[in-house]
Amino acid sequence: MRIIFIISFCLSFLSAQDYLDALIQDVLHGSRDSAAIYLPTMEQRYPNNPSLMYLKGLLETNGEEAKTIFAKLYNTHPTSDYGDDAVMKVAEYYYAAGLYVQAANWLKKMPIYYSRSEHIERAVKLFLNSLIVSGHKDTAIFYSRVFKRQFPALDVDGKIKDLLKDFEKADQEKEKAKKFAPIITEPEIPIVEYENKIPAVQFNSDNSNGIYSLQTGAYSVSENAESQKINLIIAGFSARINELYKSNRTLYVVRIGHFNNKEEARKVGVQIKSKLDLDTIVITNN
């Protein structure tokens, strides 16, 4: 009864959001007692509050359960104040568990959806390292170039060089150790699978009925087209892939937007050239 009175007294002076934020800060600074006491009552009052979900995840001592809570927070409230924090918590759980492919799939959400997050520098470094240690060095180098353009204030070149150097050193030590150890079979590393459900960032001028689009490339290998599409999406352009059949083979073409006239399309083409140094052509949609 006394606990309920204290909670009601506190909430009468602070808004629920301010109070939740204060409890979250307490937990982040190592003080968990107050939050643990107040959590059950506040859950009854605000069961779907994203801040409360984040607080609950912080208090959860079971890593798997905490990861599930943070993932639910991201999936249900991606634009909340703690959306980026939740993504990082899930990614860090997988990274710490050595599940680098899963970690990369979560970390890549940060530059796409939370490019202004306070965690972006750490996210970029963990993402690149996750790709490197999971055997996708070329993909990491590709993304380092993308991030260099997207985040000019970050020392991306320095980060990727250090990560590659550390990886090569560890790889050399592993090879050296093999000479003095029994035969060791390396675990098969799964291929990074990029989600096809990334929502495209739409231009104000983008119109599905527009008769013109921009084309940045045509590839015989779908993975190459997918890489360029992701590159464009990260930079803020609504890219898509269309399949064309020509001379008894399939081409995967990367296109951007739907425009009512060629001038609108050319203006966006100038932006793409400026941001990504990609040449574009204006095509007529069939």
Image (cartoon, rainbow, N blue to C red):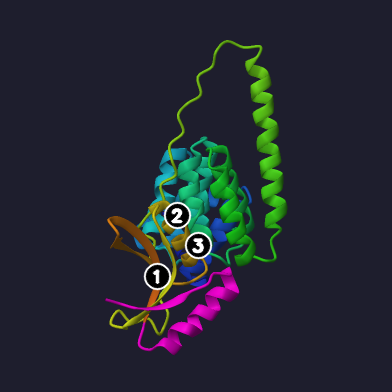
Under mark 1, the amino acid is: Arg
Name the residue located 46 percent from the left edge and 56 percent from the top edge.
Answer: 227
Q: 205 or 116, which is in the foreground?
A: 205
Picture coordinates of residue 162, whole percent (x, y): 71, 45
Question: Of circles 3 and 1, which is in front?
Answer: 1
Q: Quadrant of residue 200?
A: bottom left
Could you tell me residue 52's position as x and y percent? 44, 58
Task: Write the start and end of the magenta stretch as one range.
Answer: 259-286
- Residue on which the image places disc 1: 255
Q: Can you tell which mark lies on residue 231?
A: 3
Residue 44's place in the image compared with 208, above or below, is above
Residue denoted by label 2: 224
Q: Quadrant of the C terminus?
A: bottom left
| Residue 1 position in % (x across, y down) | 41, 54
- Pointer 1: residues within 10 angstroms few (<14), some, or many (20+)? many
Q: Are marks 2 and 1 in contact (CB under 8 Å)?
A: no
Quarter residue 64 falls in: top left
Could you classify mark 3 by the number of other residues whose Cα lies within 10 Å: few (under 14), some (14-19), or many (20 or more)?
many
Rendered position, 2 above or below 175:
below
Q: Please name whichever residue, 248 or 96, is drawn nearer the observer in this view of the structure.
A: 248
Q: Nearer the viewer, residue 270 or 168?
A: 270
Most distant residue in the front direction: 247
Q: CA distance from mark 2 to mark 1?
A: 13 Å
Amino acid type, mark 2: Asn
Question: Which of disc 1 and disc 2 is earlier in sequence?
Answer: 2
How dense is the environment of label 2, judged by Cα within 10 Å: few (below 14), some, or many (20 and up)?
Answer: some
Residue that appears at 46% across and 49% down: 105
**Amino acid marked by disc 3:** Asn
